[in-house]
Image (tube, rainbow, N blue to C red):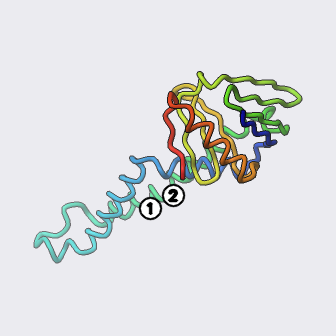
Amino acid sequence: MDKITFSQEYSFQPFLKMAMVAFFTRPIIVFLYLFWGGFLIFGEFSDSIFSSGAFVSDGFVLYFFVFMAVFYPYSDYRNASLSYKSLEQFRAEEGVFTINDQEIKYDSDKYQIRMNWDLITGVRERKDWFFLKYNEKAGLYLYQGNMNPSDIAIFRSIIRARTDIPSKLRA
């Protein structure tokens, strides 16, 4: 039975980076940026294509694209900051994760959490994080910076052995 143990403290910079990556990789956000960016680029050349000029004014597209480029990242930064601040008692201390093929344990001075793998409904791996989803709106983030490479390999093997958990892992 493989077992990994690592400590984790939730600091603001990795949390913010994770939130921004999660936001900007959502398909609808990527589509909106490409769509309005295409209008912006197309609008510059539309006068030569359509004799009557652009079908959407260049000014509107430019202002809307700038609005998206400023408002959406700021909004996501603000939401991530508020989420991080709301977890004050949880983030203020360092805890130890112990993960094996039976359960996930988190021990700290204030919290002792035990979670069976049957509660996990999905696992997704990002560049620096593992996200373990356990219901529609909540999950557990494990920062890979706190794990050594052998722990990451063991964690991936535990997930791959669980055929009942949908996962998106890197090779």
Q: Residue at x 68, y 48 (%)?
A: 152
Q: Quadrant of the N terminus?
A: top right
Amino acid type for the residue under numbered disc 1 = Val
Which residue lies at the image location 53% right of the left edge and 33% below the top edge?
122
x and y, in percent, of residue 78 in the image: 62, 46
Position of residue 49 measured from the top left corner of the image (x, y, whole percent): 14, 73
Q: Which residue is mark 1?
A: 66
Q: Nearer the viewer, residue 72 or 169?
A: 169
Question: Which picture quadrant has residue 61?
Answer: bottom left
Q: Position of residue 139 (x, y in %)?
A: 61, 32
Based on the displayed image, in which of its 4 quarters is residue 91 positioned? top right
Closer to us: 147 or 24: 147
**Residue highlighted by disc 2:** 70
Marks 2 & 1, CB-CB < 8 Å contact = yes
Q: Is residue 113 left or right of residue 57?
A: right
Instruction: Classify residue 8 by image quadrant.
Output: top right
In the image, residue 23 sits, relative to residue 96, either above or below, namely below
- Residue at x-position 82% and y-position 25%: 111
Instruction: Tell me residue 33's x, y (percent).
Output: 39, 57
Q: Look at 77% across and 34% down and name the residue there.
A: 98
Q: CA separation, marks 2 and 1?
A: 6 Å
Residue 38 numbered tag:
none
Say few, some or many: other residues with alpha carbon within 10 Å of mark 2 (under 14 / 14 to 19 / 20 or more).
few
